[in-house]
Amino acid sequence: MAESIVVLGYGAVGRAVTAQLATRGGSVIVGQRSEPAALPKPATFKSVDLNVRESVVSACAGADAVICCAGLPYRSDLWERVWPAAMRNMLDASAAAHARFVFADNLYMYGPQTDPLVETMPLTNFGRKPKVRADITRLWQEDHARGRVEAVAVRASDFYGPKVETSVLSEFGIARLVAGNPALIPYCPDYPHDFTYVPDFASALVTLLDAPSDCYGQAWHAPNAPTRTLRDHLAMAAGIIASPLRVRILPQWLKPIIGMFEPNIRELHEMQFQTDRPYRVDSSKFTRRFWNDSTEFEVGIAATVASYR
């Protein structure tokens, strides 16, 4: 078991990973630019700038494992400029420390697909953000193949859970319903779509942290509860809140206009392939090797509702 772990990034996933690691002993260092308001004991903080190689190498010195939970603002130009350099810095830091590297990843690198997503699908050259994710995937794969870093990725679908700020289901759906407002959804909510509960994603990352070496050099899909539609989840939340379900769907013709003023809406255009058709994720590779008790939506959505109350 890794005794000294560095968690880079303290958003929703970083918080969930740190909370789990804090219960098992050993050293846990959380690294990002600004210090969080609070950390679970015995975790400690170290200021890190992922853009600066020396900063990352210093933060990871002496670590047995490095878990990247970092995220960037949802802007293609920023991703293209920052992600490749940040990945290179994290791999260099892991190599210098002789530490394992565990990457909390998404599913963009597959690009547009119609079949359920599996880990063996080829890396895409589609778009800007999907291409960036494919490019940084090649970086850790190449370092692992060269024997430079023992690296692995755990990939999750769209997040949801308590206080998950970047989640359509949590922030634009459940939080608004709790506040008495209609859910505001930027796409059709009626296609089957897999969602990953953030605590389950954290558990999958911790599982790979301690996994045998033959599990490295590859990607694993985090397990999800059985597929439903976004509208199903919102209806479940409304039932828990004991209020009528109200959903406001952003019309397609309005998106370019809003995108002139709201960058996140503009950035969604190239990602329509995730929401204009069924979006299913095959996690059977992970569940066959490790565990298959992902959190039921009834439990996860109830916890999410409670957090916004």
Image (cartoon, grey):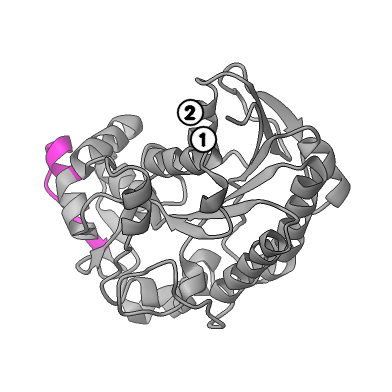
**Front-most of 246 and 6?**
6
Question: For the residue carrying disc 2, how many other residues have a C-alpha within 10 Å: few (<14), some (14-19), or many (20+)?
Answer: some
Tell me the quarter of the image containing the C terminus: top left
Q: Quadrant of residue 64?
A: top right
Q: Is residue 303 visible?
A: yes
Tell me the quarter of the image containing the N terminus: top right
Q: Residue at x 72, y 57 (%)?
A: 147
Q: Please provide the residue range marked out in magenta.
A: 237-248
Q: Residue 269, position in %: x, y?
A: 46, 77
- Label 2 and label 1: CA atoms lie apart by 5 Å
290 shown above or below 271: above
Q: Quadrant of residue 237?
A: top left
Amino acid at dot 1: Val
Q: Is residue 238 magenta?
A: yes
Q: Can you identify the residue that label 2 sits on? A: 20
Describe residue 192's horizontal placement relative to residue 304 as left or right: left
Does dot 1 land on a helix, a strand or a loop? helix
Amino acid at dot 2: Gln
Instruction: Check if mark 2's residue and mark 1's residue have beta carbons within 8 Å.
Output: yes
Q: Residue 239, position in %: x, y?
A: 12, 41
Q: Residue 213, position in %: x, y?
A: 57, 47
**Front-most of 256 and 213?**
213
Q: Can you identify the residue that label 1 sits on? A: 17
